[in-house]
Image (cartoon, grey):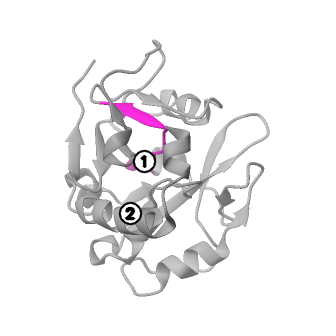
Amino acid sequence: MRARREGAPEGLIDEASAQAAAFAVAFEPFLAARVVALYSPLRGELDPICWLERPEAAGKTFVLPRTCPDRRLTFHLPTTIPIAPGTPGCTEHLVGSLIPGPFGILEPVGPPIESSLIDLVVVPALAYDLRGSRLGYGGGYYDRWLVQQRPELCAVGLGHDWQIVEALPVEDHDRPVAAILTPTGIAPCAAR
């Protein structure tokens, strides 16, 4: 999965990200959310930051994760300068404010936000299944963060259609995603 994703041409990733964004911004949990937690894409991941350019993003607050040395995630405003989602150029402004973190992933420099304020979190992965299970990168950052959150927090996956597989191994503490957003649509996940 990692090799296939990392081998995808950049133009294809941009196109697939834009196609997935069209479905994401029409997704009811996105429309209802006030605070949306995205991620900075890495090595062929679909890019959720492009959602900010969409008119549906206007009025929402977007946050990004920062990795801590104790293997925790914290979410922060991307910059100390306000960004107006839904306006042309806001994505470029946001990305320009990010700095490389410990794993080379671009991270926010703005102030932290209380996790309880987040309404929707987009969770990256190498693979997903339609039970909502996800195969992460092995660090457990999102797994640890998700189990500490309130049950009504909506977690969704974002990936290429081929990242959806028949079944993935599951552990008791794993929290499933509610849906997987792809360039061809929204795949709702069945409860385990």
Q: Is residue 122 magenta?
A: yes
Q: Position of residue 158 (x, y in %)?
A: 38, 48
Q: Quadrant of residue 96?
A: bottom right
Magenta stretch, residue numbers: 118-129
Q: Is residue 31 above or below residue 89?
A: above
Residue 155 makes an appearance in the image: no
Q: Is residue 161 above or below residue 139?
A: below
Nearest to the eye among marks 1 and 2: give it.
2
Does residue 9 appear to the left or right of 78 in the view shown? Answer: left
Q: Position of residue 63 (x, y in %)?
A: 52, 60
- Whichever of callouts 1 and 2 sits on the residue coming sooner in the sequence is 2
Kindly identify which numbered label has been placed on residue 121.
1
Secondary structure of residue under mark 1: strand
Q: Nearer the viewer, residue 111 or 6?
A: 6
Query: Which residue extends farthest bottom?
Result: 88
Name the residue at 61% across, 80% down: 81
Name the residue at 58% across, 54% down: 43
What's the amino acid at mark 1? Val
Name the residue at 43% across, 60% down: 48
Residue 139 makes an appearance in the image: yes
Q: Quadrant of residue 108?
A: bottom right
What's the amino acid at mark 2? Ser
Which image quarter is the C terminus in?
top left
Q: Nearer the viewer, residue 7 or 132?
A: 7
Q: CA distance from mark 1 to mark 2?
A: 17 Å
Q: Position of residue 143 (x, y in %)?
A: 54, 29
